[in-house]
Amino acid sequence: MGAPSREDEEAKKMEAGGDTVGQKLDAGALFVLQSKGFGYAIPIDMIRSWLHCGYHLTTSIVAPPLLSLPFAFASLGWAAGLICLVIGAAVTFYSYNLISLVLEHHAQQGRRQLRFRDMATDILGPGWGRFYIGPIQFLVCFGAVVACTLLAGQSMKAIYLIANPGGTIKLYVFVAIFGVFMMILAQMPSFHSLRHVNLISLVLCLAYSFCAVAACIYLGSSKGAPEKDYSIAGANTRDRVFGVFNAIAVIATTYGNGIIPEIQATVAAPVTGKMFKGLCLCYAVVVTTFFSVAISGYWAFGNQSQGTLLSNFMVGGRAVIPEWLLLIIELFTLLQLSAVAVVYLQPTNEVLEGLLSDPKAGQYAARNVAPRVLSRTAAVALGTTIAAMVPFFGDMNALIGAFGFLPLDFAVPAVFYNVTFKPSKKGAVFWLNTTIAVVFSALAVVASVAAVRQIILDANSYKLFANV
């Protein structure tokens, strides 16, 4: 056997709690983001490594917020909606590959970066990691946990109403029930331990997407089909303009990830090529599900598309598609939401373990198990409480996309690449990346204003613990 490569040595250092970005690994990185598979000798194990990466990527991107795409189309129309969907796919695939290339470059130099804030600290300076990237990523990922908990509660309520029409149990009760389930699921120790859960999640997202498409075709071609109006939603020009930016934020949320470095940290060294394969797997699912749901949903409901397509399938508490089909869609959605929520809980788990656990003690030592259980339970309890108090998924979805996913997933990767590799200013790569960074930074600002404006406009209908 030849001498071990630099990446192999870096993998050994990580598993032993070695140096990363000039610092000893804390318990969060060591336990939550641990890399598995070092020393694989046979091809099948190497295949599993990139497949696991593909499962994580698919669960973090292809999630029930894709059911909001017809709602985004209602503010954009056919042409602009399809253009934004194509641009979102192209830019995020490109941007996620840029992040992977930057991570591989630093790993080859002996500095394997495991977290988004590690990248910002090493590339832009400690202030960027501590005061910008780190807080935004934490808030966005925790916001995704809240949104998943809320949407899961709504799915549970829909299932309840199918089985018991006219039932009186409130939404917040279902949110609380899902929160208790999440407290158990949150105890899975590391990102790597979710690989089989995320494989099931991949299958589930395909299943409920195809069922949703079938439901839209069924309803849209039936005698009692809703009237199809494809004019842009909005009472006046100002509302329509802000609606466009709100829709862009929704699409950004749908394509958003925010945890690419954390996912790549779970890949066994050498990581070269594995993230690209994982992204190809993920985007095969993305294209299949996003476009089919967006097109069929907007075709069936036009500008009457609700914040989530599931809301269009129930009118006045009763199903407008076959109940068995709605039940399958809601059940598959509910199951995948549990996987998505626990994936986006990982950055929170990593921060909490870094603060409360001892890296010198074993991962399953009593010294570390007790604070892990208590802190993760408390984090889920907080997210569940917020979801029950403010149950308005559409507005929450837009704000998360505008404030977090647009800068993190569209603008920042291009900046990281240009600063790291310093491409020639005479070349196309430099100007392409600069254009992406400038355009999507501006969109993030405007879309954030539009999302906040929409929340203010809808504030009159807001009621804590509302039963929506």
Image: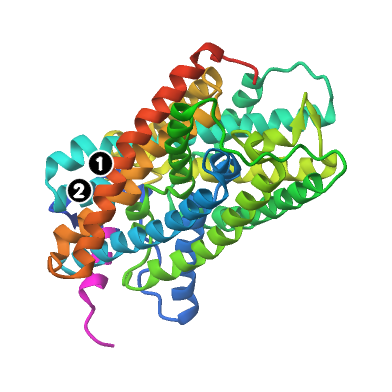
**Which residue is disc 1 drawn over?**
133
Hey, which residue is sitting farthest bottom in the picture? 1
Query: Is there any visible trace of residue 46 in the rendered image?
Result: yes
Quarter of the rendering occupied by the N terminus: bottom left
State the extent of the magenta-drawn residues as a range.
1-14
Query: Is there any visible trace of residue 361 in the rendered image?
Result: no
| CA neighbours of label 2 inside 10 A, class few (<14), some (14 to 19), many (20+) | many
Question: Pointers 2 and 1 in contact (CB under 8 A)?
Answer: yes
Q: Nearer the viewer, residue 82 or 178?
A: 82
Which residue is drawn at the image coordinates 69% and 31% (left, top)? 156
Residue 162, image quadrant? top right
Rounded to the nearest angstrom, the CA distance separating label 2 from label 1 is 7 Å
Asked if residue 287 lies left or right of residue 114, the reply is right
Identify the mark at residue 438; answer none if there is no mark.
none
Q: Residue 293, image x and y in percent?
A: 63, 51
**Which residue is disc 2 drawn over?**
120
